[in-house]
Image: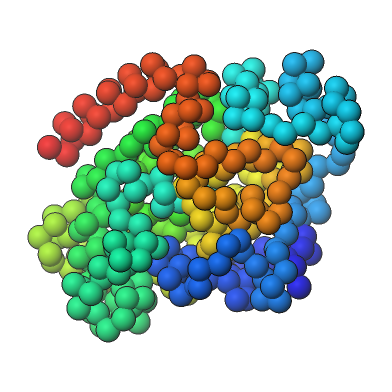
Amino acid sequence: SPLTARSLSRSLAEPPGAWPRGGLGPCPAAAPHRPQVRGVRSACGAPRAVLPPRSHRIPWTRPLSLSAAAAAVLGLGHCGGDGRKQLSLRDVAELMRSRECERVVVMAGAGISTPSGIPDFRSPGSGLYSNLQQYNIPYPEAIFELAYFFINPKPFFTLAKELYPGNYRPNYTHYFLRLLHDKGLLLRLYTQNIDGLERAAGIPPDKLVEAHGTFATASCTVCRRNFPGEDFRGDVMEDRVPRCPICTGLIKPDIVFFGEELPQRFLLHVVDFPMADLLFVIGTSLEVEPFASLAGAVRGSVPRVLINRDLVGPFAWQQRHKDVAQLGDVVQGVQALVELLGWSRELQELIHKEKAKLDARFK
Ligand SMILES: [Zn+2]
């Protein structure tokens, strides 16, 4: 049956990170299990709809004071027929410029990092996932399985060495999100990526929900002590399996493995999505649950903007009249928005300044 407010409430009552039955594990590597399907569907084949739990739903009030111009843009009053007007990217930029929208939630996926050279876990042939043969593991999923990790942690640390902070650099999209934060417009950035490029772009951790974990911190698998990921950089770079300085237990970066709970911070979605007044979905195929269902958790009056190669998820099968789809190259899509916002020069300066910082830090 479709995922309803009630079933969402129920799933929230379960331990954090418990997955809806039939859903996929949190790790991006989960995707290849899944047949290539358009949109996310429940087991019975019906599209899933997610509403905020009743207690978090906002009664029918208009929380924003709308200017006449914005009201016109939003199709409130002026248009005939059903009074609805399709939004454009230009309209969205205007809503941001006028700060009619200033609690922006962003959902980001692998597509924002491919321009940085990060292999997309899901691209058959060229993707990291299909290149895992070099790690000499029995089957690709094993690299994110705890049972295998305890027997042979080396393949995972080979991947860790590749993705450890410093190897890859944030790109235009990451810095756009940073600028969104600098301007006080970013409520939260939910990312499926484990490359840490959001942090590297200078977005503070409290603005992030790294749904699939991070290399920025690591935990001892025996005494559970938590450490900065930097403490083990030397080990990882020199192909040594890191050990706990206290108890010599095996150290595991805080990446979410199959069957592991999602980070506690993921629960922030319960408050963030009902509070959002604008949603961006950037570079994600919205195929991994429960991340995918979040796109439906913003209020019906909230514009949702998809910047992605293809039309995906609810943008394809459960459209709302305030959906905007900017399809094609992700960076070009973000650039188009940045130009409409009038932020181009400011963003270039930010990129220049931050690039110099990273060059100095990771030279
Ligand atoms: Zn320990």
The answer to whether 152 is drawn above or below residue 156 in the figure is below
Residue ranking furthest to the left: 238
Tell whether 254 sits left or right of 65. left
> Residue at 25% of width from left, 68% of height from top?
131
> Residue at 64% of width from left, 53% of height from top?
316
The answer to whether 106 is drawn above or below residue 160 in the figure is above
Between residues 305 and 182, which one lies in front from this camera angle? 305
Labels in figure, total: 0
Tell whether 27 sits left or right of 325. left
- Rendered location of residue 318, percent (x, y): 71, 54
The answer to whether one can see residue 168 in this image is yes
- Rendered location of residue 255, percent (x, y): 37, 62
For the C terminus, give its image quadrant: top left
Between residues 162 and 225, which one lies in front from this camera angle? 162
- Rendered location of residue 329, percent (x, y): 43, 41
> Residue at 24% of width from left, 63% of height from top?
159
> Residue at 48% of width from left, 28% of height from top?
336
- Rendered location of residue 99, percent (x, y): 64, 21
